[in-house]
Image (cartoon, grey):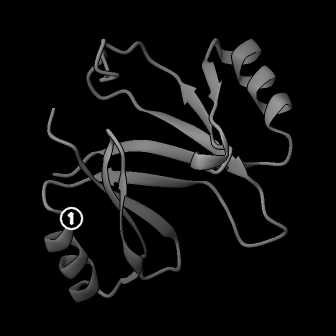
Amino acid sequence: MNPVVHFEMPAVNKKRVAKFYETAFGWETQQLGAEMGHYLLATTTPLDKNRMHLNKGAINGGFFQKPKEGKVPHLVISVDNLKKHMEIVKKAGGKVLGKPMDISGIGEFVMFKDTEGNQVGMLEPSQM
C-alpha cells in the first residue's frame, strides 16, 4: 500500500494563510524563495534531524500561490519506483502530467490526473 505523504493547498496571501494555520493549529511555516516557486512549507508534525516524521502516519505539506482558476488542494503519494507507478497509473486509466522532476534532498516527483480529473502527485523519496 502506498501512503499519502504530503498535502498542498492554494493560497492567495501566504502571510495570511501562514498566520491562520500557525494560530489555529500550531503549525510551523517556512517561506521558500524564488528557486522553489515561493512555496510555503507547512510543518504539522515533529521532524527528526533528517526532516523525517517522528509520528508515523502524520504528514506535512505546503501552500502554493493560487492561480486565477483550476487549482484545488491535492495530495502526494509515496511510491517505491516512480517510473513503474507512472505506467501503473496509465494502465489504470490515469494520465501522467509531464516528466518526473528531481526535488533536491526530497526525491523524484511527477503529477498525474486520476479517472475523475483530480490532480495527484507521486513521489519516490530520496534514499537517506
- The residue sitting at 66% across, 61% down in the picture is 72
Tell me: residue 29, above or below residue 60: above
**Residue 77 as seen in the image, left or right of residue 119:** left
- The residue sitting at 53% across, 79% down in the picture is 117
Instruction: Pick the residue in front: 2 or 14.
Output: 14
**Residue 8 as seen in the image, left or right of residue 64:** left
Q: Classify 10 Å Cα crowding around label 1: few (below 14), some (14-19), many (20 and above).
A: some
Q: Amino acid at mark 1?
A: Leu
Tell me: residue 74, above or below residue 22: below
Estimate the x, y position of residue 77 in percent, counting from the top left: 33, 53
- The residue sitting at 80% across, 71% down in the picture is 69
Corner quadrant of residue 86: bottom left
Residue identified by numbered label 1: 82
**Residue 3 as seen in the image, left or right of residue 74:** left
Corner quadrant of residue 71: bottom right
Tell me: residue 113, above or below residue 43: below
Estimate the x, y position of residue 94 in percent, counting from the top left: 36, 83
* Position of the C terminus by quadrant: top left
Instruction: Pick the residue in front: 49 or 12.
Output: 49
Estimate the x, y position of residue 83 in percent, counting from the top left: 18, 72
Estimate the x, y position of residue 92 in percent, counting from the top left: 25, 83
- The residue sitting at 27% across, 86% down in the picture is 90
Instruction: Pick the residue in front: 11 or 73.
Output: 11
Q: Secondary structure at mark 1?
A: helix
Tell me: residue 104, above or below residue 19: below
Count of number-bearing discs:
1
**Residue 75 as seen in the image, left or right of residue 9:** left
